[in-house]
Image: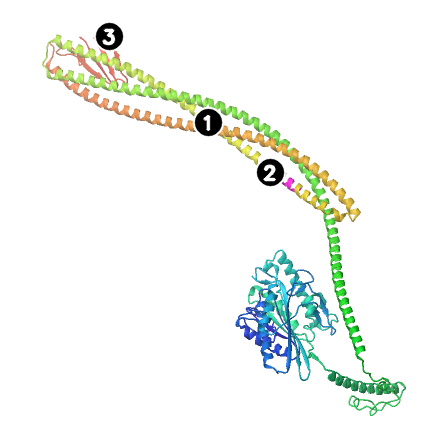
Amino acid sequence: MFLLLLKSLFGLQQGKPYVFDRVLPPNTTQEQVYNACAKQIVKDVLEGYNGTIFAYGQTSSGKTHTMEGKLHDPQLMGIIPRIAHDIFDHIYSMDENLEFHIKVNAGCMECSSCFPSFFLVSKTNLAVHEDKNRVPYVKGCTERFVSSPEEVLDVIDEGKANRHVAVTNMNEHSSRSHSIFLINIKQENVETEKKLSGKLYLVDLAGSEKVSKTGAEGAVLDEAKNINKSLSALGNVISALAEGTKTHVPYRDSKMTRILQDSLGGNCRTTIVICCSPSIFNEAETKSTLMFGQRAKTIKNTVSVNLELTAEEWKKKYEKEKDKNKSLKNVIQHLELELNRWRNGEAVPEDEQISAKDQKNLEPCDNTPIIDNITPVVASISTEEKQKYDEEIASLYRQLDDKDDEINQQSQLAEKLKQQMLDQEELLASTRRDYEKIQEELTRLQIENEAAKDEVKEVLQALEELAVNYDQKSQEVEDKTRANEQLADELAQKSTVLSATQRELGQLQELSNHQKKRATEILNLLLKDLGEIGGIIGTNDVKTVTDVNGVIEEEFTMARLYISKMKSEVKSLVNRSKQLESAQIDSNRKMNASERELAACQLLISQHEAKIKSLTDYMQNMEQKRRQLEESQDSLNEELAKLRAQGTVLDKEKEHLTRLQDAEEMKKALEQQMESHREAHQKQLSRLRDEIEEKQKTIDEIRDMNQKLQLEQEKLSADYDKLKIEDQEREMKLEKELQTLHNLRKLFVQDLTTRVKKVRMHSCHPTYCNPPVHIITKWDLFFNIKSNSMKTIGFGEGGVTTVYLKGYSFALLKP
C-alpha cells in the first residue's frame, strides 16, 4: 500500500481536487515529516518486510532537503539520517537473542547518457542483475557492514561527495543524478534459528526541469534532457501499473526502474513524497507532479515477510502441501467421474453432485489409481549428491548471470543500432527534405537570377542615363561656376568702385564741411561789418561827403570780395554735391543690379545643390541595391558552401549528385556573371563617387566664395546705409543753418531799414529834397527778395551794383 505525502503545496488556485494520505504545509518540521511517512517503515523492515521511500518533484522543490537535510544537525537532518538513528534505537530495544547484520551502500545514477551508469564510492559503472528469486540487484557493488549511526552517516557523506551538482536559474545546488541509499538488515534468532531479512531503499530523485526556466546550457542541458528522459521512464512504469491492463511493464527502459522494480508493484511497502513548489510561477509543473502522485496511488503492491525457513519448517510445509495435493487430486477424480456420467447422458442427482463443502470430505475412488501410491517415497540425499547439486546450481547461476550480461549487452547494442537506424532514417529524411529545399531554392534562385539580370540591365541603363545627366549637370555647373566667377569679379570691381566713391564722398563731405565753416565765418564777418556800418550810420554825425563815400566804398569793396569768394566756393560745392548725388544714384543702380545678379546666382546655386542632393540620393539608393545584391550573393555563396558540405551525404544518391553538380555549375556560372556585373558596377560606382567628390569640392568652393561675396555685400550695404544717414544728417544741419541765416537776414533787414530811415531824416540834400524812394544823394541801399542763390553783378550803367545773397538781394547805387 502506498502512502503519498505532499510536502509543500501552497498558493495554487482552486480547481481539480487531489486526494493524498497526508498533506504537510511548508512550515512542517523535519521531525514531523519523518514521523508521518518514515517511522512506521523502519518497524516494518525490522519485522522482515521490504520498504522504499523516494522523493519526487520538480527541481528546487525540496527533495534533497526532505531526504537528507543537514546530516549532522539534530533539528534539520532529513529522513535518511533519522532512519539510521531510529534503526539502531529499535535494535537496542529488541530481544537479546536476536543477531543483526546491517549492510549499507550509497550509489548515484548519473544521467549523462541514454542508459545511466550506476556507481558507488569507487565510481565504477556496474550492471544490474537478478537473483534466484528474480529480484534485481547491482552486481559488484561495495557493501559495508555498519555498527552505529555514525558509520552510516560516513557512508552517506562519501556518496554525496560523488554526486554531481550544478547551478541553474532555479536551484543553486541542483542534483544532476539520482541518489539511491540501500540498507539491508538480516536478523537471526539464536535460539529458534528463525531468519528474517528486509531491504530499505531510500531514493532521492533528480528533479524534472523546464529548460526555459532553468536556463541550462551545454553539458547541464544534456543532463537535463537525460534526467527528464529517466523520469519519463519512471512515469511510463507508473502509468502501466496504474492501468492494470497492460501485460508488459517497461522496467528495463531505465536502470532506476529496474532497481526499483520490487518497489513498484512488487514485494515492498513504498512511500512516495510528492514535493511541490509553493510558487505560482511553477503552477503547471506542480499540477503535473500531483497527477503523477495521483496515478502512483492506484498501484497495489503484494507484501510478504522475507522469512528463511529451517529444515523442520521446510518438512512441515512439505507435508502440508502434500496433504493439500492429495485432497485436490480426490476432488479432480470425483469431478472427472461426474463429468463422464454427464457425457454418457446420465443425469446426476443433486445429492450426488460434488459441492464446495463436500470437497474436503471426499475419499479416494476405488477404480482410480492414486498417483501418490505410485510415487516412490523420497529417498534421502547423500552429501556428495548434495554438493554435486549445489555445484550445478552455482554453475547454472553463473550461466544465468553471463546470459543476463549478454542480454544486457545485446539490449544495449540493439538500442544503439535502433538509435543509429533512427538517426540514419532521420538523416535520410532530412537529406531528402534538404534536396527538395535545394531544388526549390535552385528554382527560386534561377527566377531571382533572371530577375536580377533584368534588374542589372535596368540599373546599367539607369547608370548610363545618370552618367549622361551627370555630365550635362557637370557642364552646367561649370558654366554656372564661370558665370559666378564673372559675377564675383564684377562684384569685386563694383566693390572697388564703391569703396573709391565712398572715399571720394568722404573727402567731399570733409571739403563741404570746411566750405560751410568758411561760409559761416564769412557771413559772420559780413554781418559784423554790416552791423558796424549800420552803427556808424546811426550813431555818427553826418560827415563830409568825401569821408563817408571813402569809408563806404572800402567797406563795400571788402564785402564784394568776400561775397564773390563765397559765391565761387558755394557754386563749386553745389556742383560737387550734384556730382556726388548722381554718382550715388549710379552706385545704387549698380548695387541693385549686382544684388539681382547675386540673387540669381544664389538661386542657381540652390538649384544645383538640389540637383546634386538628388543625384547623391540616387547614388545612395544604387549603393543600397548593390549591397543587397552583394548580400544575396553572399547568401548564395553560403548556400553553395552548405551544398558542398552536404556533398558527402548526397554522393550516395547518384541522381541527386548529378543534379547537384548541375546546380553547382549553374551556381558557378551565376557567381561568375554576378561577379562580373558586380565588378563593372563597382568600377562605375567608384568613378561616379570620384566625380561627385570633385563636383562637391567645386560646389564647396563656390559656396565659400558666395558666402564671402554675401559678407562683402552686407558690409557695403551697411556702409551705404551709414553714409546715407550721415548725408541726411548733414542736409538737416545745413537746413538748420540756412534757417538761422534767414532769421539773421530778417533781423539785419529790419535793423538796416530802421537805420536808413534815420539817415534820411538827418541828411536831406537840397537838390533832392523830394527824391524818389529809390534815389539817395550819396549811397542808397535797398533789398529785394529775388532767389535762393547768390551771385554778384559788377557796376553797370548808372553806377548800379546788385548783390544777391541766398534768399536776399540788395543794390548799391552810385550818384
User: Is disc 2 in contact with disc 1, using a CB cutoff of under 8 Å?
Assistant: no
In the shown orientation, is residue 614 left or right of residue 324?
Answer: left
Residue farthest to the left? Answer: 541
Badge 3: residue crowd in 10 Å (few <14, some 14–19, many ≥20):
few
Query: Looking at the image, is 766 positioned above or below residue 574?
Result: above
Look at mark 1 in the image and give the residue it sits on.
596
Q: Earlier in the sequence, mark 2 or mark 1?
A: 1
Numbered disc in front, either 2 or 1: 2
Look at mark 2 in the image and give the residue it sits on.
621
Badge 2: residue crowd in 10 Å (few <14, some 14–19, many ≥20):
few
Residue farthest to the front? Answer: 384
Q: Does the rendering let one see residue 812?
A: no
In the rendered image, residue 270, in percent from the top left (x then y), is placed at 65, 74
Badge 1: residue crowd in 10 Å (few <14, some 14–19, many ≥20):
few
In the shown orientation, is residue 181 left or right of residue 415?
Answer: left
- Residue sitting at x 72%, y 82%: 310
In the rendered image, residue 357, in percent from the top left (x then y), is placed at 77, 90
For badge 3, the amino acid type reads Gly
In the rendered image, residue 802, in percent from the top left (x then y), is placed at 23, 12
For badge 2, the amino acid type reads Asn
Question: Which numbered dot is residue 796?
Answer: 3
Residue farthest to the bottom? Answer: 351
Q: Is residue 652 magenta?
A: no
Q: Earlier in the sequence, mark 3 or mark 1?
A: 1
Q: Does the rendering let one see residue 268?
A: yes
- What residue range appears in magenta? 621-632
